[in-house]
């Protein structure tokens, strides 16, 4: 079985910016930081699938991407899930062509559903996970630091392809392998 997901990669400049943000927050203990090269925007998580399903996904997503134009995204603010009072996940929010991103993700989900891939149960909330908190606790200092960082200007990037990744869980974090690139050709 292949643990996999479909995502948008960030640009090198965005990864560098997120790394700088992580470094400003590193004095906060108990946060496992996502390696900058692993930061991505998940469009669809598949979980464990077989090779035949991978081949089906390649065909489906290739056909969807033919009519989609590239789009521009940028970081907009930082936050936490479920909230900043007791966060488990630290994230960077997104701005830019968000309406187009939502339509694109919905199209992907609906098209895959026709091929017996389940629709996502959670609403799509575009974000870039930058850290995971092992033991959520009151985070007043972290919340203040994030508010200060939110004032920074951010880098935008052009999304001109999406990627199907294989994900392997390792003791030090996840290891991602490109399985397939899908250019946005619209």
Image: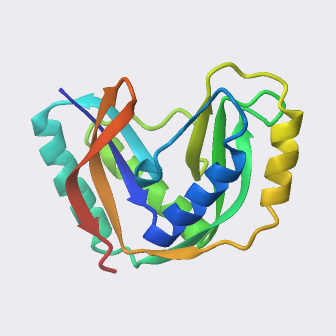
Question: Where residue 120 appears, x then y in whole percent?
Answer: 47, 37
Coloring basis for residues: rainbow
The residue positioned 68% from the left and 19% from the top of the image is 135
- Is residue 92 among the parts visible in the rendering? no
The residue positioned 62% from the left and 22% from the top of the image is 134
Q: Quadrant of residue 153?
A: bottom right
Nearer to the camera, 107 or 7: 7
Nearer to the camera, 53 or 178: 178
- On the rendered structure, is 182 left or right of 100? left
Q: Quadrant of the N terminus?
A: top left
Question: Where residue 4 appears, x then y in whole percent?
Answer: 29, 38
Q: Quadrant of the C terminus?
A: bottom left
The residue positioned 51% from the left and 75% from the top of the image is 157
Q: Quadrant of residue 85?
A: top right
Q: As displayed, is residue 70 above or below residue 161?
A: below
Nearer to the camera, 20 or 125: 20
The residue positioned 72% from the left and 52% from the top of the image is 78
- Is residue 177 among the parts visible in the rendering? yes
- On the rendered structure, is 130 left or right of 36? right
Q: Quadrant of residue 45?
A: top left
Nearer to the camera, 38 or 53: 38
The number of numbered badges drawn on the structure is 0
- On the rendered structure, is 20 left or right of 13? right
Question: Where residue 8 appears, x then y in whole percent?
Answer: 41, 59
Can you name the residue that lies furthest to the front here?
Answer: 27
Question: Where residue 130 appears, x then y in whole percent?
Answer: 57, 46
Q: As displayed, is residue 70 above or below residue 91?
A: below
């Amino acid at each position: 079985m292949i643990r996999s997901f479909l995502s948008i990669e960030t640009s090198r400049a965005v990864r560098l910016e997120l790394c700088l943000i992580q470094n400003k927050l590193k004095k906060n203990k108990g946060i496992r930081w996502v390696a900058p090269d692993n930061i991505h925007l998940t469009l669809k998580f598949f979980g464990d699938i077989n090779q035949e399903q991978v081949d089906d996904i390649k065909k489906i997503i290739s056909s969807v991407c033919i009519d989609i134009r590239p789009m521009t995204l940028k970081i907009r603010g930082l936050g936490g899930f479920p909230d900043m009072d007791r966060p488990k996940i630290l994230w960077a929010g997104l701005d830019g062509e968000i309406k187009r991103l939502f339509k694109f993700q919905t199209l992907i989900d609906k098209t895959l559903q026709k091929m017996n891939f389940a629709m996502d149960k959670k609403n799509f909330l575009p974000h870039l996970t930058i850290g995971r908190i092992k033991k959520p606790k009151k985070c007043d200092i972290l919340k203040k630091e994030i508010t200060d960082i939110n004032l920074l200007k951010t880098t935008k990037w052009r999304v001109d392809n999406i990627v199907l990744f294989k994900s392997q869980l390792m003791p030090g974090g996840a290891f991602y392998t490109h399985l397939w690139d899908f250019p946005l050709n619209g």
